[in-house]
Image (spheres, rainbow, N blue to C red):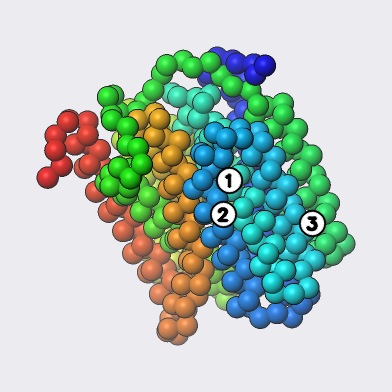
Amino acid sequence: MVRRMQADSSFGWRVVAGAFVLATFGWGLGFYGPPVYLHAVQEARGWSVVLVSTAVTVHFLVGAVVVANLPALYRRFGLPAITKAGVVLLAVGVLGWAVAHEPWQLLLATLFSGAGWVAMGAAAVNAIIAPWFVKKRPAALAMAYNGASIGGVVFSPLWVAAIGWVGFPMASLAIGAVMIVTIWLLADLVFSRKPDNTGETTSVAGAPSLPGRKLWRDPRFLTLAAAMALGLFAQIGLIAHLFSLLVPALGDQWAGLVMGAATAAAIAGRTLVGWLMPAGSDRRLIACVSHGVQIAGSLALIVAAGDNVVLLVAGVLLFGAGIGNTTSLPPLIAQVEFAKEDVARVVPLIVAIGQGTYAFAPAAFGALRMLSPAEATLVFVAAAVVQGLAIAMFLWGRRAYLCTLSRMPLT
């Protein structure tokens, strides 16, 4: 018999800790891992950058398809079972990257890794946390999502060191085995618990449910999905190239340290918003402010002109401050804008749309670098423009949300 506990109870914070660990492994292997795998596979097999980069894109696109169907999978098999299946698929997929001797084997491995990691990604973390927290959900999600940033801090250098020490196949076996045991235990001991239904809600009072295609015609959903996708596209596109753009002015070592500082800024920004955001605040406006800070960072990077170290560091820190909020704020917006029964559909869908979009961001920003000798300026301008469009989407959707609250037709 499943044991039920009061939502927002002390056990809920144990769930947050478990989700933090889940996110650390999920992003560490499924998000920050592929760039390292790309380099390792290319060096071991001598395959072209285009081929291996295509594998990374397929990895994320497959994940986008699976994450859109997570609610149905959870309903049929249960969250613990899907989490266990996800961790096994991810471990097998990463091992497949390591041992692939033919291009088709590499692409087959991406099907496993891409399908598996999203059961440990943003939508999964939200599904784990949401039943336990209502009023404190922003803080709980912020803490759990910080595991994603820690995943990059821990696993990016760990993968490099482990591959250099024992080789990619043995490294993937060892890290995959630790991940499977850890997450399997969490699924049985923590994620299998369910809280009592408190009846609390922060959704729009009396908001009608939007079953089937109605959701896809709702401007709140469309603008939220577009805003998240645009924000992630700008973010992933810039981050993918930022290190190489910083190296000429800072050198390899300092560029790496500044990139680490961006991760620290992401953790700080997400935590501050999660804990300090007032109850009843307009979450779309908060998202606009967060993107505005990132635009300020892009502008500082433009003004730095590639050689002003102070402005370069300031720009990276400002841009980094909003990185975490791009992932954590959209689910919180969905929590307040949609009927409770729709939130479980909205969050995986916006995550899927975002992932399917940002899968192409590194290539798109790379193409920009080929257009002009002023490659850095083009990248930073593009990031600022795309994030400006994300702000426009948040504001457009805010108007639709306010019309819902006032029961006035949208004109």
> In the image, is 154 to the left or to the right of 378?
right
Q: Are marks 2 and 1 in contact (CB under 8 Å)?
A: yes
Quadrant the N terminus occupies: top right
Q: Estimate the spatial distance between the alpha carbons at disc 3 and disc 2, rounded to whole Å.
A: 20 Å
**Image depth: mark 2 or mark 1 in front:** 2
Query: Residue 2: percent from the left, percent from the top?
Result: 65, 19
Which residue extends farthest right? 166
Quadrant the C terminus occupies: top left
- Whichever of labels 3 and 2 marks the residue nearer the N terminus, that label is 2
Q: Please tell me whether residue 369 is drawn above or below residue 392 in the rendered image.
A: below
Q: Which mark is residue 121?
A: 1
Task: Say whether residue 159 is visible.
Answer: no
Q: Which residue is mark 3?
A: 172
Quarter of the rendering containing residue 200:
top left
Asked which secondary structure carries label 1, the reply is loop
Which residue is nearer to you in this view: 175 or 161? 175
**Image depth: mark 3 or mark 2 in front:** 2
